[in-house]
Amino acid sequence: MKILLTGKHGQVGSALLRVLGRAGEVIAWGRSDLDLLDLKSIPEKMRKLRPAVIVNAAAYTAVDRAERERELAFAVNAEAVRALAAEARKLDALLVHFSTDYVFDGEKATPYVESDAPNPINVYGASKLAGERAIAESGCRHVIFRTGWVYSASGRNFVRAILAAAREKPELHVVNDQRGAPTAADAIAEAVAKIIASNGLKTLASGLYHLSAGGETTWYGFAKEILQRKGIAVPVVPATSDQYPAAAKRPRNSLLDSGLLRRTFGVALADWRGPLAAVLDAIH
């Protein structure tokens, strides 16, 4: 089985590159191999390769910058995805795609399920929702995984930002009124590889699934856990979102209920604290 992986240099993409080989022959592309802004090149390259599975881990993820780069965010997260989905249908390939908790407004008190109505409050979330809908409208066979609060030992993410800040500042002020479940890129990759490898591609029903770590915390709680495990004694002070406004609004509740994933595929991610130790050990 030939698997095309896009976005091989991103957090989830690089994690997938390490494990997808269990499911088939992997061809991994980065931006230099496939420019998602060049829509005309997508059909040509897809038809030449003819993959059985397209795992799209490429995305525009600069949440705050997207507020002033709306066209670029939608070009990558929606229009390029629409082109990938169209080719997946023509090739009868399975499209595996990643979306985000930011498709929701965060006003719900409990974790979001797949049937909850999306209502993004920032451009990034709106662009990812447009990508989801483009896939559904294309008629291609697809599996969309929504996740959030992703981190790894490389790339730009909260864990690395907190460790860098702790080296430079006498104390850290971190938002304590946004809830979520930090989810390791490696855990996402392991789950997706298992699902692809253990399910017949022709019988794998199209669908949308939440793929998130168990448990919950806040950014403040996450920061405390990171520094405690690293033995760093820099104080962490709780703050409100209003005290540290960003260009893009964030949902107050980013919790995703992954029950449907567990019931459908028998896959469940562990509590968010579990994978953190390995990631911290890999950061020097």
Image (cartoon, rainbow, N blue to C red):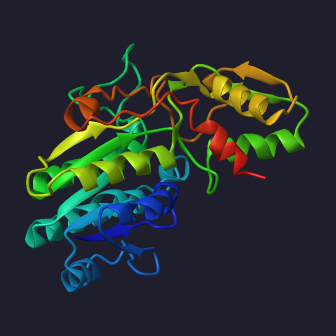
Query: Looking at the image, which is closer to me, 44 or 130?
Result: 44
Q: Residue at x 35, y 62 (%)?
A: 22
Q: Residue at x 26, y 65 (%)?
A: 54
Q: Position of residue 62 (x, y in %)?
A: 53, 53
Q: Classify residue 218 by image quadrant.
A: top right
Q: Is residue 115 above or below residue 246?
A: above
**So how many labels did they put on this image?**
0
Q: Classify residue 243 by image quadrant.
A: top right
Query: Looking at the image, which is closer to me, 164 or 283?
Result: 283
Residue that extends furthest to the right in the rendered view of this protein: 170
Q: Position of residue 15 (x, y in %)?
A: 49, 57
Q: Residue at x 55, y 47 (%)?
A: 64
- Side (left or right) of 272 relative to 159: left
Q: Is residue 79 above or below residue 136?
A: below
Residue that extends furthest to the top in the rendered view of this protein: 109
Q: Position of residue 174 (x, y in %)?
A: 70, 28
The answer to whether residue 124 of the structure is visible from this angle is yes
Q: Position of residue 34 (x, y in %)?
A: 38, 78
- Side (left or right) of 115 relative to 194: left
Q: Residue at x 26, y 83 (%)?
A: 45
Query: Looking at the image, which is closer to me, 170 or 65?
Result: 170
- Side (left or right) of 107 relative to 24: right
